[in-house]
Image (cartoon, helix red, strand yellow):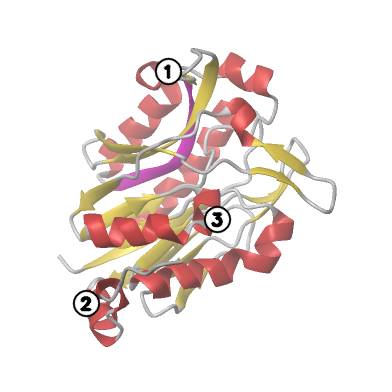
Amino acid sequence: MDKFRAACVQMRCGRDIGTNLDLAERLIREAAADGCAYIQTPEQTSTMEMSRKALMAIIAEQDADEGLKRMQALARELSVWLHIGSMSFLASDPATGEPKAANRSLVLTPDGSVVATYDKIHMFDVDLENGESYRESSSFEAGARAVSVALPWGELGLSICYDLRFPYLYRALCQQKGASILAIPSAFTKKTGEAHWQVLMRARAIECGAFVIAAAQGGTHENGRKTYGHSLIVDPWGKVLVEAEDETCFVAADIDMGQVAKCRQAIPSLTHDRSFDI
């Protein structure tokens, strides 16, 4: 199976989990009706709650999370590979035992099973020039393990948003795990997105000779945060196959996995690493 249709679901989530999942379900159903076999939602599909106290009060452990169960039932009903870009689950700091959240991506099979999970490794702790400030590490426990999963069409390397800025993660996924598709679900800020979103996505695709699929949050959220949107799918040569414009929508593209081998043969940089001193 070398060809399939993939979709990015673009959302503008607020604080209410039920409302957000209603939106996700509607767009997932539309993408499935369009013939998409792999559907990806953005980072923080279930809630964009910024307050640590409020977040910890509304999330559950993964096995008890009703929102995840709803998404599993949907994947089973539609018989699609459903990639939840991320949801927040109760976790803890392994060193101190302090309660924290996990920013976790989940890949669901067409029978609704959770076949892979990935906890975001790189925390977005940043003060922007426009006055915006983010401290993900105060609420979330960083992951420590890179993850890939076999889809019917190729190996999918998992990542989330800020991971995009750390190219060695994607190179390792491709070289060590054989990834040919890179997932980068995101909630990129509007300011950084306008400057860097597309060029970094295209760079990761070109460097790795891999497809990049990146569903995003987009618009002004209930908490006042502004995210960039522009969910996109990029081919291994760096061509943008599709890019979202509306704040809430899905975009889809037909994927031909044969392009991966062609691009890697034309520019075999993944096999040309050399050790060096510095």
Classify 10 Å Cα crowding around label 2: few (below 14), some (14-19), many (20 and above): some
Q: Nearer the viewer, residue 228 or 253?
A: 228
Per the image, the residue denoted by label 3 is 249
Q: Image check: 228 left or right of 278? A: right
Residue 238 at what x, y percent from top left? 44, 78
Distance between the Cα atoms at labels 2 and 1?
40 Å
Give the extent of the magenta segment.
81-90
Residue 234 at what x, y percent from top left? 43, 71
Is residue 88 part of the magenta span, yes or no? Answer: yes
Q: Image check: 8 left or right of 198? A: left
Q: Image check: 228 left or right of 88? A: right
Mark 2 or mark 1: name the one nearer the start of the chain.
1
Mark 3 or mark 2: name the one nearer the start of the chain.
3
Residue 90 at what x, y percent from top left? 48, 19
Per the image, the residue denoted by label 2 is 261
Q: Mark 1 and mark 2 in contact (Cβ < 8 Å)?
A: no
Is residue 127 shown above or below 47? below
Amino acid at circle 3:
Cys
- Disc tally is 3
Residue lying furthest bottom: 266
As helix, strand or loop, the secondary structure at mark 3 comes to: strand
